[in-house]
Image (cartoon, helix red, strand yellow):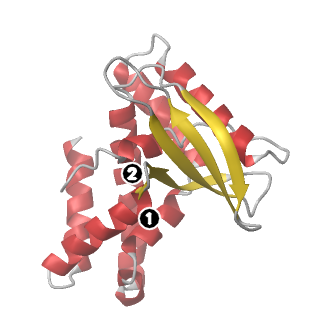
Amino acid sequence: MKKFPIILFILTSIFYSNVAYSISPDVFVQSTVNRAAETLGTGLTKDERIEELKKIALETVDIRGIGFYSLGSHRKTATEEQKDEYERVFKEYFLQSFSSRLAEYSNPIINVDSKKKINENYTIVSSTLAATEKRPSVKIEWRVYTKNKDQPLIRDLIIEGLSLARTQKEEFNSIIQSADGDLNVLLDNLRNFSNAN
């Protein structure tokens, strides 16, 4: 299964601790990346960083929502048993995928530039990943789900105009279509990825 290099950035979507009050989406995103940088900049071992990043992901990313969006129209034809299994293996896949890749980074600097409220449920927060000697700056837009004002969640990242969720949806669809519509093949791919890492 293709390992998305861009999912790496969904990683940085994962870093905000629970709060008991409403928080602005732009403050949420900036706090998120600040926590990411702190986690990656400590003296923890790689395995320790991975475990910490997984905990953060569970707090701040709508993994279930991203997972079922990625499944697309195949969700309609899946059995309840397949849906339950997909939700389980996608969660494992997502956590393993982002944490192992992000753990290789050190102190990513992302600065929030602006925000745009789309509706009551969504706000787009624009930010910039600062350039380094090895890479140019990168424009990142965060799609923040704000239906619950006390707990905003990341639903998607758009990296230089490319939606990570849409890209993943297209890849999952390709895997299923190549298997003549057999969802079990995608489930096997996700399991294999998690077991191999």
Which residue is tagged 1?
67
Indicate the amino acid at tag 1: Gly
Which amino acid type corresponds to the residue marked 2 in the rendered image? Phe
Label 1 SS = helix
Q: Quadrant of residue 180?
A: bottom left
Q: Position of residue 116 (x, y in %)?
A: 70, 55
- Quadrant containing the N terminus in the rendered view: bottom left
Does the residue at mark 2 contact the one at mark 1 (Cβ under 8 Å)? yes
Percent coordinates x, y for residue 22 in the rendering: 84, 48
Image quadrant containing the C terminus = top left
Real-space Cα distance between discs 2 and 1? 9 Å
- For label 2, the residue is 94
For the residue pair 180 and 92, the one nearer the viewer reads as 180
Above or below 132: residue 179: below
Q: Determine whether 84 is above or below 135 in the image.
A: below
Residue 56 is left or right of residue 133, and the answer is right
* Mark 2 residue crowding within 10 angstroms, few (<14) / some (14–19) / many (20+): many
Residue 110, position as x, y percentages in the image: 55, 30
Q: Is 125 situated left or right of 56 in this image?
A: right
The residue that appears at 34% across and 52% down in the rendered structure is 93
Q: Is residue 89 above or below residue 48?
A: below
Please tell me whether residue 122 is drawn above or below residue 59 in the rendered image. below
Q: Nearer the viewer, residue 1 or 129?
A: 129
